[in-house]
C-alpha cells in the first residue's frame, strides 16, 4: 500500500503545473478553456482568500483574452444586481463598497469581502473603457420577499394596474410576515393554503406582457424587464423551495441547483446575439461546481450545477475545482452567529488534499485529459474536504468530508497548500434578516 501511495505522489508530481504567482502561471489553463462558453470556478470553502484571489485572476484573463461577458455568483439576484449596476456605471452607488451593500444577510462575508471589493473595482474600470460590458449576476433563489419587491417596483413604473394585480397575488404570503420558512413549514405540511398558483400566474402575466413593456425604450427597457422577469422566476422557485425544505433535503437541494442552471441559461440567452453566443463564468462552492455523479451525492439522488451544465452543454463547459491542505478560514459555528477566523487542521491522510500536500509542491494546477495517467489515478475514490459557511473542525470527518472521484468530478483542479481566511469588509459583522442565507440549510 505504501508503495502504491508513493507511486501516486510521483504521478501527481509529474502532472502538476506549479503556480508561483508569475504572469504566465495560468497560460495552460486559459488554453485548456479553449472555446468553452461556460467556465465554472469552485472553492473548497466560503471563506478562503486564495480561492477568491485565484478565481479573480482566472476571470480577468478569460474576460480579456476569451471575451467572457458575465460572472454568475452563488448569490441572490437582487443582491448581486446592485453590484451589477455599479460595474456598468449606472447612476446610484458611486463606489465599490456601497455597491456590495446588497450582501447584508448572513453570511455577508461571502461576497462582502476585500477580494470581491478589489474585483468589482477592477471590473468597473474595465467596463468604463470597454465596448462590450461585463455583468455581475446572482443565480440563487432565497430572496423571496426582496424579489417580490423588485417585481412590484418595476410594475409600479410601467403598469400600475398590473402592479395592483401583483400585490393581490403576492399578498398570499402576508400571514407569514417576512419569514419564508414559516410559510414553507405550513404550506409544505398542508397546514395552510399554498401560494403556488399565485406566483405562477404572476410570472405568466409578466412574461406575456414582454412586448408591451419593452417596445418603446430600447436597451434600457429590455434590461429592466429582464431583471423583473428573473425576479418573478425567482419568486416561483423560492416558493416551491420553501415548501419542499421541510420534507426532503434532496428535493430542495435539487430544486435550488436546477434554478441556478435555469438562470444561467436565461442569462446566456439574454446576453447572446445571432453572431456571438454568450460566454459566462460561475463562482460557487465545489459542491455545486463539481459533477455530483462523481461524488456520494449521487447515492442520495442529488444533482448539482456541474452535472446539469455538463448534461446541457457537454462540449461547451469546463469545471475547475479548488483544494487546500491547511491554514485558516472565515466561518461561523452556527447560523446567524458572528463569523470567526478558524484554524483549518491538516487534511486527513486518506484525502486528496493530503495526497496533493505530499507532492511537496505548494501550489499547482492539474488538468485531466481523458485516459491520461493522472485521470485514471484520481478517479479512484478518496475523501475530499468541503467547508461551508458553518465550520466545526471538532467534527470534521462527519461534517466536512465526502467521498469523490476527483478526475470525474472536475476537468481541472487548483491546489493551494496553505491558505488564509478571507477578510470581511466589516469586522465579522452580520446583519440578521428573516430570509435565510444563500447557503441555508446546507451551509454550501
Image: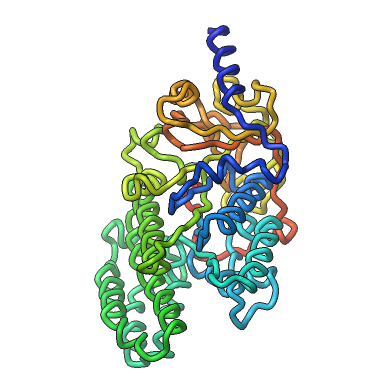
Give the vertical position of 152 relative to 46 (above or below): below
Q: Is residue 325 left or right of residue 198?
A: right
Measured from the top left, where is residue 356 in percent x and y? 61, 26
At 51% from the left and 50% from the top, the residue drawn is: 284
Location of residue 197 by image quarter: bottom left
Name the foreground residue: 334 vs 408. Answer: 408
The percent coordinates of residue 134 (x first, y second) are 54, 66
Q: How many marks?
A: 0
Looking at the image, the residue that sits furthest to the front is 275
In which quarter of the view is residue 186 placed? bottom left
Residue at the image position 44 percent from the left and 28 percent from the top: 405
Q: Is residue 234 in sight in this rendering?
A: no
Q: Residue 206: x percent and y percent?
A: 31, 79
Quadrant in the rendering for residue 318: top left
Q: Is residue 23 left or right of residue 61?
A: right
Nearer-the-camera pick, 360 or 46: 360
Give x and y (percent) for residue 418.
71, 34
User: In the picture shown, does residue 283 fall above or below 300?
Assistant: below
In the shown orientation, is residue 249 left or right of residue 417? left
Name the one closer to the observer, 344 or 154. Answer: 154
From what the image shows, is residue 78 above or below residue 412? below
Q: Residue at x 65, y 36 (%)?
A: 416
Vertical side of 94 occupied by 280: above or below: above
Task: Tell me, yes or no, if residue 360 can be seen here.
Answer: yes
Amino acid at each position: 500500500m505504501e508503495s502504491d501511495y508513493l507511486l501516486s505522489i510521483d504521478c501527481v508530481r509529474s502532472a502538476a503545473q506549479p503556480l508561483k504567482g508569475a504572469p504566465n502561471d495560468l497560460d495552460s489553463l486559459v488554453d485548456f478553456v479553449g472555446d468553452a462558453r461556460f467556465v465554472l470556478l469552485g472553492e473548497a470553502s466560503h471563506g478562503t482568500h486564495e480561492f477568491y484571489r485565484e478565481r479573480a485572476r482566472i476571470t480577468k484573463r478569460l474576460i480579456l483574452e476569451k471575451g467572457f461577458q458575465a460572472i454568475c455568483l452563488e448569490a441572490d439576484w437582487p443582491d448581486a444586481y446592485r453590484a451589477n449596476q455599479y460595474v456598468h456605471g449606472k447612476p446610484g452607488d458611486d463606489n465599490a463598497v456601497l455597491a456590495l451593500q446588497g450582501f447584508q444577510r448572513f453570511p455577508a462575508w461571502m461576497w462582502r469581502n476585500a477580494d470581491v471589493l478589489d474585483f468589482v473595482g477592477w471590473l468597473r474600470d474595465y467596463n468604463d473603457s470597454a465596448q462590450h460590458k461585463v455583468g455581475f449576476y446572482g443565480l440563487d433563489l432565497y430572496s423571496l420577499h426582496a424579489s417580490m419587491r423588485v417585481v412590484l417596483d418595476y410594475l409600479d413604473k410601467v403598469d400600475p394596474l398590473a402592479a395592483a394585480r401583483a400585490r393581490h397575488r403576492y399578498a398570499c404570503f402576508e400571514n407569514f410576515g417576512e419569514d419564508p420558512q414559516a410559510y414553507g413549514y405550513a404550506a409544505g405540511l398542508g397546514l395552510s393554503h399554498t401560494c403556488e398558483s399565485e406566483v405562477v400566474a404572476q410570472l405568466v402575466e409578466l412574461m406575456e406582457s414582454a412586448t408591451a413593456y419593452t417596445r418603446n425604450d430600447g436597451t434600457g427597457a429590455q434590461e429592466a424587464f429582464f431583471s423583473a422577469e428573473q425576479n418573478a422566476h425567482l419568486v416561483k422557485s423560492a416558493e416551491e423551495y420553501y415548501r419542499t425544505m421541510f420534507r426532503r433535503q434532496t428535493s430542495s437541494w435539487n430544486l435550488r441547483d436546477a434554478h441556478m442552471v435555469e438562470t444561467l441559461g436565461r442569462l446566456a440567452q439574454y446576453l447572446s446575439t445571432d453572431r456571438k453566443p454568450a460566454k459566462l463564468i460561475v463562482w460557487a462552492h465545489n459542491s455545486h461546481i463539481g459533477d455530483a455523479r462523481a461524488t456520494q451525492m449521487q447515492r442520495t439522488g442529488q444533482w448539482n450545477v456541474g452535472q446539469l451544465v455538463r448534461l446541457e452543454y457537454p462540449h461547451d463547459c469546463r469545471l475547475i475545482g479548488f483544494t487546500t491542505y491547511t491554514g485558516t478560514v472565515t466561518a461561523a459555528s452556527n447560523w446567524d452567529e458572528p463569523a470567526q477566523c478558524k484554524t483549518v487542521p491538516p487534511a486527513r491522510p486518506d484525502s486528496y488534499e493530503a495526497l496533493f500536500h505530499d507532492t511537496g509542491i505548494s501550489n499547482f494546477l492539474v488538468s485531466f485529459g481523458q485516459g491520461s495517467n493522472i485521470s485514471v489515478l484520481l478517479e479512484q475514490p478518496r475523501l475530499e474536504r468541503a467547508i461551508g459557511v458553518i465550520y466545526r473542525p471538532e467534527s470534521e470527518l462527519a461534517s466536512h468530508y465526502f467521498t469523490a472521484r476527483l478526475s470525474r468530478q472536475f476537468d481541472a483542479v487548483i491546489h493551494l497548500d496553505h491558505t488564509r481566511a478571507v477578510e470581511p469588509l466589516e469586522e465579522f459583522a452580520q446583519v440578521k434578516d428573516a430570509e435565510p442565507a444563500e447557503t441555508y440549510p446546507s451551509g454550501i
